[in-house]
Image: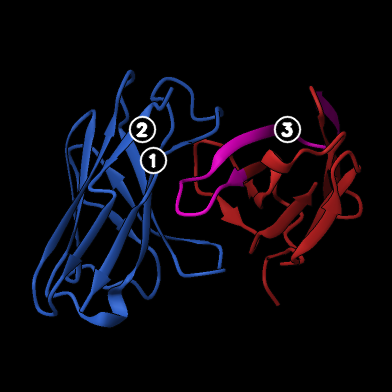
Amino acid sequence: GAVVSQHPSWVICKSGTSVKIECRSLDFQATTMFWYRQFPKQSLMLMATSNEGSKATYEQGVEKDKFLINHASLTLSTLTVTSAHPEDSSFYICSAPRQTDSNQPQHFGDGTRLSIL
Amino acid sequence: QKEVEQDPGPLSVPEGAIVSLNCTYSNSAFQYFMWYRQYSRKGPELLMYTYSSGNKEDGRFTAQVDKSSKYISLFIRDSQPSDSATYLCAMSLTGGGNKLTFGTGTQLKVEL
Protein backbone atom coordinates (compact mmCIF):
# COMPACT_ATOMS: atom_id res chain seq x y z
CA GLY A 1 0.00 0.00 0.00
CA ALA A 2 0.90 3.66 -0.23
CA VAL A 3 3.56 4.82 2.17
CA VAL A 4 3.46 8.48 1.17
CA SER A 5 0.11 10.25 1.10
CA GLN A 6 -0.48 13.53 -0.69
CA HIS A 7 -3.52 15.78 -0.32
CA PRO A 8 -5.46 17.13 -2.11
CA SER A 9 -5.23 15.10 -5.29
CA TRP A 10 -6.78 17.83 -7.41
CA VAL A 11 -7.49 21.48 -6.79
CA ILE A 12 -8.94 24.21 -8.97
CA CYS A 13 -8.82 27.78 -7.80
CA LYS A 14 -8.88 31.35 -9.01
CA SER A 15 -5.80 33.32 -9.89
CA GLY A 16 -4.34 35.14 -6.91
CA THR A 17 -5.28 32.61 -4.24
CA SER A 18 -2.83 30.53 -2.22
CA VAL A 19 -2.95 26.74 -2.23
CA LYS A 20 -1.50 24.39 0.35
CA ILE A 21 -0.49 20.82 -0.51
CA GLU A 22 0.28 18.26 2.19
CA CYS A 23 2.69 15.34 2.01
CA ARG A 24 2.67 12.70 4.74
CA SER A 25 4.83 9.67 5.34
CA LEU A 26 2.46 7.03 6.64
CA ASP A 27 4.53 4.35 8.34
CA PHE A 28 7.98 5.87 8.68
CA GLN A 29 9.66 9.07 9.72
CA ALA A 30 11.15 11.32 7.08
CA THR A 31 13.60 14.04 8.00
CA THR A 32 13.82 14.89 4.32
CA MET A 33 11.10 15.17 1.72
CA PHE A 34 11.37 16.26 -1.89
CA TRP A 35 8.96 18.38 -3.92
CA TYR A 36 8.77 17.97 -7.69
CA ARG A 37 6.81 19.64 -10.44
CA GLN A 38 5.81 17.89 -13.63
CA PHE A 39 4.36 19.54 -16.73
CA PRO A 40 2.38 17.46 -19.26
CA LYS A 41 4.54 14.94 -21.13
CA GLN A 42 7.62 16.13 -19.29
CA SER A 43 9.74 14.64 -16.56
CA LEU A 44 9.83 15.43 -12.87
CA MET A 45 11.81 18.52 -11.99
CA LEU A 46 13.04 18.86 -8.44
CA MET A 47 11.84 22.12 -6.90
CA ALA A 48 13.15 21.88 -3.37
CA THR A 49 14.30 19.63 -0.57
CA SER A 50 12.28 19.92 2.61
CA ASN A 51 14.20 19.44 5.85
CA GLU A 52 12.49 18.76 9.17
CA GLY A 53 13.15 21.55 11.62
CA SER A 54 15.11 23.75 9.25
CA LYS A 55 14.76 25.77 6.07
CA ALA A 56 14.11 24.10 2.77
CA THR A 57 16.77 24.00 0.06
CA TYR A 58 15.51 25.33 -3.26
CA GLU A 59 16.77 24.42 -6.71
CA GLN A 60 18.10 27.13 -8.95
CA GLY A 61 15.33 29.15 -10.54
CA VAL A 62 12.64 28.22 -8.01
CA GLU A 63 11.24 31.22 -6.12
CA LYS A 64 11.29 30.45 -2.42
CA ASP A 65 8.81 33.25 -1.65
CA LYS A 66 6.42 31.82 -4.20
CA PHE A 67 6.66 28.21 -3.08
CA LEU A 68 6.68 28.11 0.71
CA ILE A 69 7.75 24.85 2.30
CA ASN A 70 7.20 23.86 5.90
CA HIS A 71 8.43 20.58 7.37
CA ALA A 72 7.09 20.85 10.89
CA SER A 73 7.18 17.19 11.89
CA LEU A 74 8.88 13.96 10.91
CA THR A 75 5.82 12.84 8.96
CA LEU A 76 4.48 16.02 7.36
CA SER A 77 5.74 18.54 4.83
CA THR A 78 3.59 21.21 3.20
CA LEU A 79 4.04 23.18 0.00
CA THR A 80 2.11 26.44 -0.31
CA VAL A 81 1.84 28.04 -3.72
CA THR A 82 1.30 31.71 -2.90
CA SER A 83 -0.68 34.06 -5.12
CA ALA A 84 -1.03 31.34 -7.72
CA HIS A 85 -1.32 32.23 -11.40
CA PRO A 86 -2.21 30.14 -14.45
CA GLU A 87 1.46 29.47 -15.21
CA ASP A 88 1.68 27.69 -11.84
CA SER A 89 -0.79 25.07 -13.06
CA SER A 90 1.06 21.78 -12.97
CA PHE A 91 1.30 18.37 -11.33
CA TYR A 92 3.10 18.61 -7.98
CA ILE A 93 4.56 15.43 -6.48
CA CYS A 94 6.32 14.81 -3.18
CA SER A 95 8.59 11.97 -2.19
CA ALA A 96 10.39 10.78 0.91
CA PRO A 97 13.16 8.31 1.69
CA ARG A 98 12.97 6.32 4.87
CA GLN A 99 14.93 8.17 7.53
CA THR A 100 17.18 5.35 8.56
CA ASP A 101 18.69 4.61 5.17
CA SER A 102 19.15 7.24 2.46
CA ASN A 103 20.56 4.55 0.19
CA GLN A 104 17.06 3.16 -0.16
CA PRO A 105 14.87 4.60 -2.91
CA GLN A 106 12.29 7.31 -2.39
CA HIS A 107 8.58 6.65 -2.08
CA PHE A 108 6.39 8.99 -4.07
CA GLY A 109 2.97 10.38 -3.35
CA ASP A 110 0.23 10.24 -5.97
CA GLY A 111 0.60 13.89 -6.83
CA THR A 112 -1.59 16.98 -6.73
CA ARG A 113 -3.02 18.35 -9.92
CA LEU A 114 -3.21 22.13 -9.59
CA SER A 115 -5.30 24.14 -12.02
CA ILE A 116 -5.34 27.92 -11.72
CA LEU A 117 -8.12 29.69 -13.60
CA GLN B 1 22.62 18.71 -23.46
CA LYS B 2 20.47 17.18 -20.73
CA GLU B 3 22.15 15.15 -18.02
CA VAL B 4 19.85 12.20 -18.71
CA GLU B 5 18.48 11.45 -22.16
CA GLN B 6 15.48 9.21 -22.76
CA ASP B 7 13.46 8.66 -25.93
CA PRO B 8 9.96 9.96 -25.15
CA GLY B 9 8.24 7.56 -27.55
CA PRO B 10 5.43 6.72 -27.78
CA LEU B 11 6.42 3.08 -28.11
CA SER B 12 3.67 0.70 -29.18
CA VAL B 13 4.10 -3.08 -28.96
CA PRO B 14 1.80 -6.10 -29.18
CA GLU B 15 0.91 -8.03 -26.05
CA GLY B 16 3.55 -10.61 -25.19
CA ALA B 17 6.41 -8.70 -26.80
CA ILE B 18 9.73 -7.99 -25.11
CA VAL B 19 10.12 -4.29 -24.47
CA SER B 20 13.46 -2.52 -24.27
CA LEU B 21 13.67 0.92 -22.68
CA ASN B 22 16.89 2.89 -22.47
CA CYS B 23 18.54 5.95 -21.00
CA THR B 24 21.92 7.53 -21.55
CA TYR B 25 23.58 9.95 -19.20
CA SER B 26 26.54 12.28 -19.20
CA ASN B 27 27.65 12.42 -15.55
CA SER B 28 29.95 9.50 -14.83
CA ALA B 29 29.59 10.11 -11.09
CA PHE B 30 26.07 8.65 -10.99
CA GLN B 31 26.15 5.48 -8.90
CA TYR B 32 22.52 4.57 -8.22
CA PHE B 33 20.03 3.85 -10.97
CA MET B 34 16.28 3.46 -10.80
CA TRP B 35 13.36 2.74 -13.07
CA TYR B 36 9.93 4.07 -12.18
CA ARG B 37 6.57 3.41 -13.77
CA GLN B 38 4.05 6.24 -13.85
CA TYR B 39 0.42 5.86 -14.78
CA SER B 40 -1.47 8.90 -15.96
CA ARG B 41 -2.04 11.43 -13.15
CA LYS B 42 -0.34 9.24 -10.56
CA GLY B 43 2.99 9.40 -8.78
CA PRO B 44 5.95 7.28 -9.91
CA GLU B 45 6.13 3.70 -8.67
CA LEU B 46 9.53 2.11 -8.19
CA LEU B 47 10.23 -0.90 -10.41
CA MET B 48 13.95 -1.48 -10.18
CA TYR B 49 16.84 -0.11 -8.12
CA THR B 50 20.46 -0.92 -8.87
CA TYR B 51 23.85 0.19 -7.71
CA SER B 52 26.78 0.52 -10.13
CA SER B 53 27.13 -1.71 -13.19
CA GLY B 54 25.47 -5.07 -13.67
CA ASN B 55 22.13 -6.77 -14.14
CA LYS B 56 19.18 -7.20 -11.82
CA GLU B 57 16.08 -9.28 -12.44
CA ASP B 58 12.70 -9.11 -10.73
CA GLY B 59 9.91 -11.13 -12.25
CA ARG B 60 9.28 -9.93 -15.80
CA PHE B 61 11.63 -6.98 -15.37
CA THR B 62 15.39 -6.87 -15.93
CA ALA B 63 17.53 -3.80 -15.38
CA GLN B 64 20.98 -3.42 -16.88
CA VAL B 65 23.58 -0.79 -16.11
CA ASP B 66 26.69 -0.22 -18.21
CA LYS B 67 28.64 2.54 -16.53
CA SER B 68 31.47 2.41 -19.05
CA SER B 69 28.99 3.39 -21.77
CA LYS B 70 26.82 5.53 -19.48
CA TYR B 71 23.83 3.52 -20.60
CA ILE B 72 21.02 1.84 -18.68
CA SER B 73 18.22 -0.39 -19.87
CA LEU B 74 14.98 -1.87 -18.64
CA PHE B 75 13.59 -5.00 -20.29
CA ILE B 76 10.01 -6.12 -19.86
CA ARG B 77 9.21 -9.70 -20.85
CA ASP B 78 5.77 -10.95 -21.81
CA SER B 79 4.40 -7.42 -21.86
CA GLN B 80 0.80 -6.92 -20.82
CA PRO B 81 -1.73 -4.15 -21.53
CA SER B 82 -1.44 -3.23 -17.84
CA ASP B 83 2.21 -2.33 -18.52
CA SER B 84 1.00 0.62 -20.60
CA ALA B 85 2.40 3.64 -18.78
CA THR B 86 5.28 6.10 -18.84
CA TYR B 87 8.62 4.67 -17.73
CA LEU B 88 11.08 7.05 -16.11
CA CYS B 89 14.72 6.38 -15.49
CA ALA B 90 16.33 8.17 -12.56
CA MET B 91 19.79 8.29 -11.13
CA SER B 92 21.61 9.61 -8.11
CA LEU B 93 25.13 10.37 -7.02
CA THR B 94 24.73 9.30 -3.43
CA GLY B 95 21.81 6.93 -3.04
CA GLY B 96 18.19 6.55 -4.06
CA GLY B 97 17.04 8.50 -1.04
CA ASN B 98 18.91 11.60 -2.13
CA LYS B 99 18.55 14.02 -5.02
CA LEU B 100 17.40 12.27 -8.18
CA THR B 101 17.87 13.29 -11.79
CA PHE B 102 15.12 11.96 -14.04
CA GLY B 103 14.90 11.21 -17.72
CA THR B 104 11.96 12.64 -19.65
CA GLY B 105 10.15 9.29 -19.62
CA THR B 106 9.14 6.88 -22.38
CA GLN B 107 5.44 6.37 -23.03
CA LEU B 108 4.69 2.69 -23.62
CA LYS B 109 1.49 1.22 -25.01
CA VAL B 110 0.95 -2.52 -25.07
CA GLU B 111 -1.84 -3.45 -27.42
CA LEU B 112 -4.07 -6.52 -27.39
> Disc 2 and disc 1: Cα gap in Å?
5 Å
Residue B6, relative to residue B95: is it above or below? below
Residue B71 visible (yes or no): no
Q: Is mark 2 on a helix, strand or loop?
A: strand
Could you tell me which residue is drawn at 52 percent across and 44 percent down? B44
Q: Name the residue under label 2.
A: A4
- The circle on residue B50 is 3
Magenta region, residue range: B37-58
How far separated are the C-alphas under marks 3 and 1? 22 Å
The residue depicted at 77 percent of the width and 66 percent of the height is: B7
What's the residue at 87%, 34% (across, down)?
B78
Residue position marked by numbered label 1 in the rendering: A109
Provide the letter of the chain coloured blue.
A
| Mark 3 secondary-structure assignment | strand
Nearer to us: label 2 or label 3: 2
Task: Give the structural element (helix, strand or loop) at label 1.
Answer: loop
- Chain letter of the residue carrying label 1: A
Mark 2 belongs to which amino acid? Val
Q: Determine the colour of chain B.
A: red
Residue B47: within the magenta? yes
Separation (CA) of disc 2 from disc 3: 22 Å
**Magenta stretch, main secondary structure class:** strand
Amino acid type at mark 1: Gly
- Specify few, some or many for label 3: CA neighbours under 10 Å numbering under 14, 14-19, or 20 or more: many
